[in-house]
Image: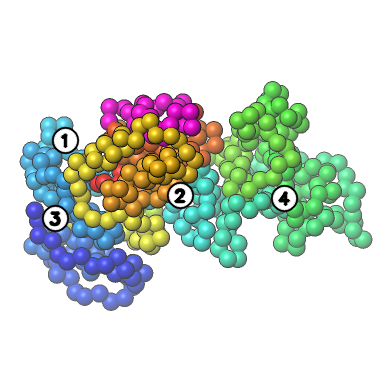
């Protein structure tokens, strides 16, 4: 096991990330290029640079093992944990503790022949993949980073986060004067106008369709008067009405009150017609409670959906997060698309075809957030060796991105070393002992019964792990693992495939099976984890890691 320096507390990381412009002590390393000195200085002050690099020039190639040392150092700094592997025999050619920790966390993998090849230089595309894995196990994503600046970002439902982040990134959605998104607040007619008009303005080919019908409500000087219209929205609403993007009935609406689902469809279809120059077809059999043409057209375009019972509820109101999703759907219907990873790499790097398919997503992510750049000829050089200073600089840029975010989004309250899978099997055995117990809503004790998340909460609590009580909370506990990597003891979080809402929790026990408090009819049972086709796996969380 390699020697370990003393770990500094998490606050040192956060303070450092905000104070990088301050003077730092002179480097203890040799052969550092001028462009890399600031990032290497910061990484050294943070204590994440592997100690063995003090012995040689940082312009030399970094090895796969040294990358593991740096990644584990950084993970320990962020989480405040000292990590040790469950076992040291994962690979036939190394028993290095940090390599095994990185493997057990899912940061690195080995080769098909059972080796790790620790002394091999790490290529640039391998570095990108390792760094992407590092971000993934922390739970970081571009969407999460985008929303993290808002004081109430945790109130955004999981199903709405991608759309909300997209709308923020392209400038359609902003916070209020208190930096709040207010995702659960009802959307007023004037707010809907503002969001849709920003979406409309993204299309250069959007043409005025002219006023549809003459305005009958006018002011003293012929200006159209809208009821309850706020000053901030006056110019936008008036312009949209003049362009025919609002129905004539808009002048009868109370603009500062919530817009209905049906009226929003009227506005959406008019914007689509203006941008596309075509009248959309209607899905005539879409809903049981409305035959309103604009609603049926919006459904056909994929802008809106109904409820599982076949209704649309046209007089219902919308929350802001529902509006974020519908605005995103409208943009897609009109032809707006963000660059795919493939398109981004094609534009960014002249040698993008030499990037391995397995590394493209991670390289695209690192390029978007400013971590990975091309050389002076716009080449990614994916198969070239990564020097120590390049790896340190790029990893430090990554930590600058994730440091502040992680302070408000810690992996879990569970800390400590990696442990043997035997502890996870004890959790499984305890959970299986409750098969046959009744399902009781809000139950989390064998004396009364269990609901789905209550069972998982109870068994982990008995084993000394303090996880969240409900499914939404448990979706943020531990570390995320892939479905293909599930192990006994992992928590499977399911969401409704129609609404995206978290709906069920089970405990994986191996061989494709899970134990769970399924329903009031069945109680606690063992079944296949893919038993319900109306649900999909939202996330899989490993608590004992």
Question: Going from the N terminus, do you reach mark 2 or mark 4 first?
Answer: 2
- Label 4: which secondary element: loop
Choose between 124 and 424: the one closer to the eye.
424
Q: Dots 2 and 1: beta carbons under 8 Å?
A: no
Assess whether residue 515 is covered by the magenta stretch: yes
Q: Earlier in the sequence, mark 3 or mark 2?
A: 3
* Disc number lying in front (3 or 4): 4
Distance of mark 2 from mark 1, alpha carbons?
32 Å
**Magenta residues (range):** 510-533
**Could you tell me which residue is drawn at 20 percent across and 65 percent down?**
7
Q: Residue 507, how many percent across, how many down?
A: 34, 37
Q: Nearer the viewer, mark 1 or mark 4?
A: 4
Q: Which mark is residue 60?
A: 3
Q: Are marks 1 and 3 in contact (CB under 8 Å)?
A: no
Marks 1,4: beta carbons within 8 A: no
Q: Residue at x 8, y 46 (%)?
A: 95
Label 2: state its secondary structure.
helix
Q: Secondary structure at mark 1?
A: loop
Q: Which mark is residue 143?
A: 2
- Which SS class for mark 3? loop
Residue pointed to by mark 1: 111
Query: Is residue 512 found left or right of 285 in the rendered image?
Result: left
């Amino acid at each position: 096991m390699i020697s370990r320096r003393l770990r500094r507390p998490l606050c040192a990381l956060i303070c450092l990330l905000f104070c990088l412009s301050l003077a730092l002590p002179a480097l203890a390393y040799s052969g550092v290029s001028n462009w890399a000195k600031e990032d290497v200085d910061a990484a050294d002050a943070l204590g994440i640079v592997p100690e063995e690099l003090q012995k040689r020039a940082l312009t030399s190639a970094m090895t796969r093992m040294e990358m593991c040392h740096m990644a584990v150092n950084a993970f320990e700094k962020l989480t405040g944990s000292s990590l040790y592997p469950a076992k040291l025999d994962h690979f036939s050619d190394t028993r290095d503790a940090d390599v095994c920790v990185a493997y057990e966390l899912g940061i690195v993998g080995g080769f098909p022949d059972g080796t790790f090849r620790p002394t091999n230089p790490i290529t640039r595309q391998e570095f990108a993949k390792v760094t992407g894995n590092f971000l993934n196990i922390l739970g970081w994503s571009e969407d999460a980073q985008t929303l993290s600046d808002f004081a109430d970002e945790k109130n955004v439902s999981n199903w709405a986060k991608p759309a909300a982040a997209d709308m923020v990134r392209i400038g359609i959605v902003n916070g209020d004067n208190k930096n709040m998104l207010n995702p659960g607040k009802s959307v007023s007619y004037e707010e809907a106008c503002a969001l849709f008009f920003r979406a409309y303005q993204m299309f250069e080919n959007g043409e005025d369709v002219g006023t549809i019908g003459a305005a009958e409500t006018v002011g003293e000087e012929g200006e159209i008067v809208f009821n309850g219209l706020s000053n901030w929205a006056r110019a936008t609403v008036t312009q949209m009405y003049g362009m025919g993007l609002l129905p004539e009935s808009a002048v009868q609406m109370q603009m500062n009150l919530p817009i209905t689902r049906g009226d929003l469809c009227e506005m959406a279809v008019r914007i689509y017609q203006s941008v596309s120059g075509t009248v959309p077809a209607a899905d005539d059999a879409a809903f049981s409670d409305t035959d309103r043409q604009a609603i049926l057209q919006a459904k056909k375009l994929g802008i809106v959906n109904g409820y599982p019972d076949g209704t649309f509820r046209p007089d219902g109101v919308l929350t802001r997060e529902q509006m974020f999703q519908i605005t995103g759907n409208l943009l897609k219907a009109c032809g707006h698309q963000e660059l795919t990873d493939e398109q981004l790499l094609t534009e960014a790097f002249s040698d993008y075809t030499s990037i391995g398919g397995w590394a493209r997503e991670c390289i695209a992510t690192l390029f978007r957030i400013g971590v990975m750049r091309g050389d002076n000829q716009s080449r990614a050089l994916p198969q070239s060796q990564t020097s120590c200073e390049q790896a340190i600089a790029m990893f430090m840029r990554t930590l600058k991105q994730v440091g502040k975010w992680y302070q408000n989004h810690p992996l879990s309250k569970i800390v400590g070393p990696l442990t043997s899978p035997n502890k996870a099997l004890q959790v499984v055995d305890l959970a299986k002992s409750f098969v046959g117990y009744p399902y009781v809503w809000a139950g989390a004790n064998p004396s009364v019964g269990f609901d789905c998340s209550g069972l998982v909460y109870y068994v982990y609590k008995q084993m000394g792990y303090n996880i969240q009580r409900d499914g939404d909370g448990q979706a943020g506990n531990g570390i995320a693992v892939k479905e293909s990597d599930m192990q006994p003891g992992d928590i499977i979080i399911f969401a409704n495939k129609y609404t995206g809402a978290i709906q069920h929790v089970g405990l994986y026990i191996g061989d494709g099976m899970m134990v769970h408090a399924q329903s009031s009819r069945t109680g606690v049972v063992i079944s296949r984890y893919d038993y319900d086709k109306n649900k999909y796996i939202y996330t899989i969380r490993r608590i004992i890691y």
